[in-house]
Image (spheres, rainbow, N blue to C red):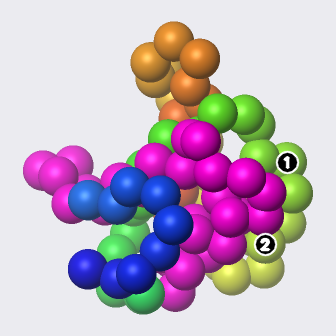
Amino acid sequence: MIDIPGKYWRASDGIHIDVRGLSAPEPMVSILRVIEAHEAENTIQVHHFCDPIYLYPELTERGWSCEIIPGEPDEVRLVLTRDK
């Protein structure tokens, strides 16, 4: 496991990171650290409290795409996928 703010775990559907409750800029920093630490991973799920609009250009620059999927109430859940 890597040392990052927020909750971070591996499940049967891949890596998850929960950044709800963190103050800016910790959510984006945490997500980018997870991406960098897991170069071999193809999918990462993010549990966020808002739509992280400033994250999208950073993902594109690093070769990742993002899709919003249904999550819990008051949650924006993202699936980050490495571009091929």
Circle 1: residue type: Ile
Circle 2: residue type: Glu
Please tell me whether mark 2 sits on a helix, a strand or a loop.
helix
User: Which quarter of the figure has residue 39?
Assistant: bottom left
Report the front residue among 65 and 38.
38
The correct choice, above or below, for 6 with respect to 2 in the image is above
Residue shown at 46%/48% (left/top)? Answer: 18
Asked whether 16 falls inside the magenta stretch, the response is: yes
The x, y position of residue 41, in whole percent, is: 34, 75
Residue shown at 51%/66% (left/top)? Answer: 5
Residue shown at 51%/12% (left/top)? Answer: 73
Mark 2 vs 1, N-terminal side: 1
The correct choice, above or below, for 69 with respect to 83 in the image is above
The x, y position of residue 61, in whole percent, is: 78, 79
Does any portion of residue 14 appear in the rendered image?
A: yes
The x, y position of residue 26, in whole percent, is: 68, 64
Asked whether 18 falls inside the magenta stretch, the response is: yes
Residue shown at 59%/42% (left/top)? Answer: 21
Mark 2 crowd level (few <14, some 14–19, many ≥20, 10 Å Cα): few
Along the horizontal axis of the image, is 28 left or right of 42?
right
Q: Quadrant of the N terminus?
A: bottom left
The correct choice, above or below, for 67 with respect to 3 in the image is above
Q: Which residue is mark 2?
A: 58
Along the horizontal axis of the image, is 83 left or right of 41?
right
Does any portion of residue 38 appear in the rendered image?
A: no
Mark 2 touches mark 1? (CB < 8 Å): no
Q: Which residue is mark 1?
A: 53
